[in-house]
Amino acid sequence: MRAEVILCFVLALNLYPAQADVFEVGDSGDFILRAGPSHQANTTRAVDKPYREASNRAAEAAQISPELLSALVSQESGWRSTAVSAKGAIGLTQLMPHTAARLGVDPHKPGDNLRGGAIYLRQQLDRFGDLSLALAAYNAGPERVAAVNSVPQIAETRAYVDRILARLAEISLPESPSPDFRLKDTP
């Protein structure tokens, strides 16, 4: 009975695809729903503290800035390692199971999840050569971005890209920005 109620609830959430609803699985196995803007990341850096070192290592290995990975994780999961989206994305970087398998990482292990998310973002940066397009591909899928060679006209994806770029600016601007933070001008 409980599984049927949860299934109905998850299916009902899919009626509103622009919402970024996130489920967390508590220690007891209970589902916790974080819906809409309330699950957005806290802007304090204390949230990422338990995973900062692993995040920095993952960013360095993937040759992306730690601030970029931090901004992505803040948006994707609010730094909650147990986050599971209504579409099945898992963990800190909200990897889909098939993407995690292809990358050879366990999405339930925070270190693996961060490594997988960093590698996947690096792949999108290499493919598209543009931060906005790479972020859109991370969110909507690379084929959707390749089909239009721009950020797709998907409200959720456009908002996602804008929020990560704003978060990146928030994280990096109080300190002096490094040269590798110059964003490519888009027409």
Image (cartoon, grey):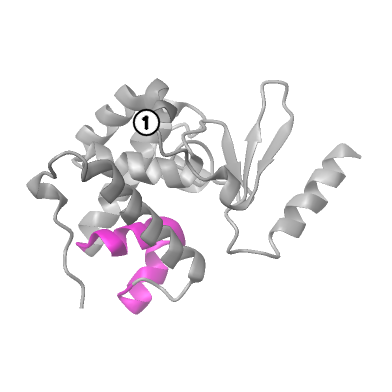
For residue 29, which quarter of the picture?
top right
Residue 187 pos. (x, y %)? 20, 78
| Type of the residue with mark 1 | Arg
Question: How many residues crowd mark 1 within 10 Å: few (<14), some (14–19), many (20+)?
Answer: few
Main SS class of the magenta portion in the image: helix
Q: Which residue is mark 1?
A: 45
For residue 105, which quarter of the picture?
top left
One can see residue 9 in this view = yes
Q: Which residues are magenta?
A: 129-150
Residue occupying image coordinates x 72% and y 35%: 31
For residue 12, which quarter of the picture?
bottom right
Residue 130 pos. (x, y %)? 22, 62
Q: Is residue 103 above or below residue 37?
A: above
Residue occupying image coordinates x 40% and y 33%: 44
The quadrant of the rendering that contains the N terminus is: top right
Q: Residue furthest left?
A: 179
Residue occupying image coordinates x 47% and y 26%: 109
> Which residue is nearer to you in this view: 111 or 157?
157
Q: Is residue 33 left or right of residue 45?
A: right
Q: Is residue 82 left or right of residue 106?
A: right
Count of numbered circles on the image: 1
Residue occupying image coordinates x 59% and y 41%: 84
One can see residue 95 in this view = no
Q: Is residue 130 one of those drawn in magenta?
A: yes
Q: Is residue 86 left or right of residue 11?
A: left
Residue 28 pos. (x, y %)? 72, 21
Residue 59 pos. (x, y %)? 25, 36
> Which residue is nearer to you in this view: 128 or 99?
128
> Which residue is nearer to you in this view: 38 or 184?
38
Q: Secondary structure at mark 1?
A: helix
